[in-house]
Image (cartoon, rainbow, N blue to C red):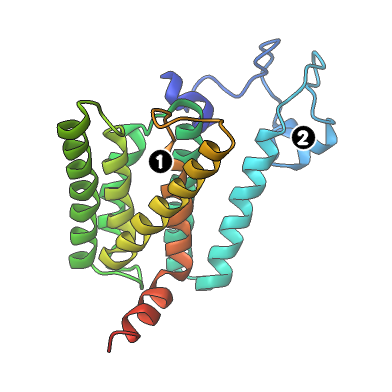
Amino acid sequence: MVVHRLPRGESTITPRSHCPWCGHVIRLRDNLPLLSWIRLGGRCRDCGSPISARYPLVEATTGLLFALCVLRFGATPAAAIAASFCALCLALGLIDADHYLLPNKITYPGIVLGLALSTPAPWTDLRSSLLGAALGAGALSLLIGLWYLLRRSQGMGWGDPKMLAMVGAFLGLESTILTLFLASLFGSLTGAILLARRRADLQSRLPFGVYMAIAAVIALFFGPGWVDWYVSWWR
């Protein structure tokens, strides 16, 4: 619902969920994640129009991420913080994939929430989160400015620095660096594949928020271990 409504400027509270084809309000029993879509055969109960498979896929992905948070951090407040972060990243990644947009209504509250939760989060602290948010915003803002000076065009949207600042607020400095590295790697590999297949050119846009979302979730689960492993090579 958030992914569908927010970029269209619609309220995420009202009206109640309804069929986009016939407008009928979806009954409570037909609004259960995964189960209702399977029981209805992927169609509206009232008009029989198809319901996109994207809905159960997003629900299943969200449930899987939440389960992984509990497996990784146990039934603790840390798992709840991690699950909130995963939900934000998933929403931002999907919206960016559809609209090349990273809404301020998610990134700004996400930055505040990440900083507020930095003390109870076991993988960061307030100082690291502040530095991570500053680095996230500053690094991509600098890149946008340099790209404009060199090419006289905007290489990415201003939502990208805000999203990376949110990542920094939640994960801290070291995992923000890892997120930026992995997102750049994933984006470069995707661009190279598309160029090789002639599906894109050097002027084509890529939704960098998608790669940041994937990289940030990886950094959440594996970042501290990977960073410690990397640092150990230089000791």
Q: Nearer the viewer, mark 1 or mark 2?
A: 1
Crowdedness near tag 2: few (<14), some (14–19) or many (≥20) residues, C-alpha within 10 Å: some
Query: What residue is rendered at 43% in x and 24% in y?
Result: 7
In the rendered view, does 186 fall on the left or right side of 64?
left
Q: Is residue 165 above or below residue 78?
A: above
Q: Is residue 97 above or below residue 188?
A: above
* Secondary structure at numbered mark 2: helix
In this orientation, does residue 10 appear?
A: no
Horizontal and vertical percent position of residue 147 = 22, 36
In the rendered view, does 213 fall on the left or right side of 28?
left
Give the amino acid at mark 2.
Trp
Which residue is more in the foreground, 227 or 191?
Answer: 191
**Quadrant in the rendering for residue 45:** top right
Crowdedness near tag 1: few (<14), some (14–19) or many (≥20) residues, C-alpha within 10 Å: many
First in residue order: circle 1 vs circle 2: 2
* Secondary structure at numbered mark 1: helix
Query: What residue is rendered at 42% in x and 30% in y?
Result: 205
Quarter of the rendering occupied by the C terminus: bottom left
In this orientation, does residue 177 appear?
A: yes
Q: Is residue 135 above or below residue 158?
A: below
Which residue is more in the foreground, 132 or 112?
Answer: 132
The residue carrying mark 1 is 208
Give the amino acid at mark 1.
Phe
Quarter of the rendering occupied by the N terminus: top right
Kindly give the residue lying farthest to the top in the view shown.
22
**Quadrant in the rendering for residue 53:** top right
Kindly give the residue lying farthest to the bottom in the view shown.
235
Horizontal and vertical percent position of residue 120 = 32, 68
Query: What residue is rendered at 19% in x and 59% in y?
Result: 130
The residue carrying mark 2 is 37
Horizontal and vertical percent position of residue 159 = 30, 35
